Amino acid sequence: MSREFSIRPIEARDDQAVAAIIRSVMPEFGAGGPGFAVHDPEVDHMYAAYTQPRSAYFVVERDGAVSGGGGVAPLENGPQDVCELRKMYFLPAARGIGAGSAMMHRCLDAARAAGFRRCYLETVDRMEGARRLYRRTGFRPIDARMGGTGHFGCDRYYILDL
């Protein structure tokens, strides 16, 4: 198996693979019940959801298969200058190879290009590897959720000045 990967914008043909990744990874971290992104209506239609203004979603390809993804979009019911890092999940085969850092930079570049000044994210304490990546990237923890994502199952919140 190659340690190489590529990142590209999502295409309509990726919807099924991305939905399967989200539905596989979230329960792995105890985040499969109510109040988590796995239940968002967009999960089955990620391509269409991220063709909206100021939104972008990217996939990681490794060995010819989609093995992860991540994106940004305006924070629902949040300030106009704040985006949310959304649905950034990777299958185990795509972890620990630099794909997370590369995806983070791609998403943050898209956020800056869309005119956002801050990036917000929600996660769970159990996603330790992801939280290390967020801190390494410069995200800082905040005490309370922002906006109205509906993800009441999340217990950790971060913000980054872009």
Image: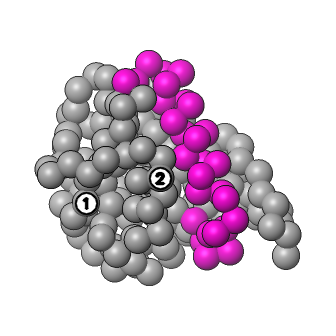
State the image coordinates of residue 144 (x, y, percent, origin top left): 14, 50
Q: Are marks 1 and 2 in contact (CB under 8 Å)?
A: no
Where's the N terminus, which quadrant?
bottom right
Label 2: which secondary element: helix
Label 1: which secondary element: strand
| Residue under the point 80% across and 67% down | 3
Q: Which mark is residue 136?
A: 2
| Residue under the point 42% across and 29% down | 162
Label 1, label 2: how far apart the Cα atoms are: 16 Å
- In-front residue for pair 4/139: 139
Q: How is the image coloured?
A: one colour
| Residue under the point 59% across and 57% down | 100
State the image coordinates of residue 41 (x, y, percent, origin top left): 37, 53
Q: Which mark is residue 156?
A: 1
Task: Give amino acid for label 1.
Answer: Arg
| Residue under the point 31% across and 23% down | 81
On screen, residue 72 above or below 52: below
Dot 2 crowding, Cα within 10 Å, few <14, some 14–19, many 20+: few
Task: Give amino acid for label 2.
Answer: Arg
Q: Is residue 91 magenta?
A: yes
Dot 1 crowding, Cα within 10 Å, few <14, some 14–19, many 20+: some
Name the magenta segment's main secondary structure.
helix
On screen, residue 146 above or below 100: above
Magenta stretch bounds? 90-117
Count the numbered circles shown. Answer: 2
Residue furthest to the top in view is 115
